[in-house]
Image: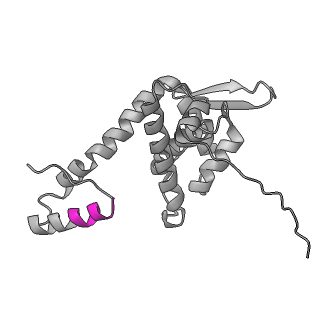
Amino acid sequence: MTKKNKLQLVIRKNTLQETIENSTINFESFEQGVEVFSFAAQSRALSLANVELQPRKLSNYIRSGYVQLSIVNCVILHQMTGAYGISRDDLYDMVCKSYPATSFANFRKILSIGVDSEILIREKDENDSRRTIYRIAEEMLEPYRVFFSSTMTHFGILFTEVFKGAIDDQEFELLMRYLSERGLVALPPKQ
């Protein structure tokens, strides 16, 4: 019996620190990088997880909000891989994985609004002048982080305000405990 030497390919994954450092986004701090990356990934994961559950006949008005968020998250996550930016076609493909009913015309309109609003930066690709590259405007990183951290931090309080009074107190506490145990909402502080 002969022994065969097998060449084993070991793929090393980046640490979080390396991912943030190798990103083409200039974060103000490591903490900002962690928060922006985690919120973008979380939001992208939620949109991908709900592809089959989305109503098929959402109006363009409602759908555009989801597409706007998806565009920003896809750009950030692509830049987190170390890429300088992402082409319009690649970005459209990523968005369509989450929202397959998105028309290219609607996508282009929303992308253009993001550029006009200075949320995204559009530049010619240095390697191919026929292509356009999109990247996140670095001035938007802190507002993006604040938006998501505020949303997540205050969700329990907002949830309380929405449901308090609609159901009795015992049922409300049961609902909050149920959601908290599943990690869906943080229990608001006792008053």
In the image, residue 179 above or below residue 140: below
- Direction from residue 5 to residue 69 in the image, left or right: left
**Rendered residue at 43%/38% (across/down):** 35
Quadrant in the rendering for residue 15: top right
Q: Position of residue 93 (x, y in %)?
A: 67, 49
- Of all residues, the one furthest to the right in this rendering is 2
Quadrant in the rendering for residue 142: top left
The secondary structure making up most of the magenta span is helix
- Of all residues, the one furthest to the front in this rendering is 1
- Direction from residue 163 to residue 79 in the image, left or right: right
Q: Position of residue 135 (x, y in %)?
A: 61, 30
- Direction from residue 62 to residue 104 in the image, left or right: right
Residue 103 visible from this viewpoint: no
In the image, residue 156 above or below residue 22: below
- Of all residues, the one furthest to the bottom in this rendering is 1
Quadrant in the rendering for residue 80: top right
State how many labels appear.
0
Task: Indicate the quadrant containing the N terminus: top left, top right, bottom left or bottom right.
Answer: bottom right
Color theme of the render? one colour
**Rendered residue at 14%/69% (across/down):** 171
Residue 66 visible from this viewpoint: yes
Q: Nearer the viewer, residue 40 or 181?
A: 181
In the image, residue 130 above or below residue 47: above
Q: Does the magenta portion include 99?
A: no
Q: Does the magenta portion include 178?
A: yes
- Direction from residue 114 to residue 160 in the image, left or right: left
Q: Nearer the viewer, residue 183 or 102?
A: 183
**Rendered residue at 41%/34% (across/down):** 145
Q: Position of residue 175 (x, y in %)?
A: 21, 66
**Rendered residue at 65%/34% (across/down):** 82
What stretch of residues is rendered in magenta? 176-183
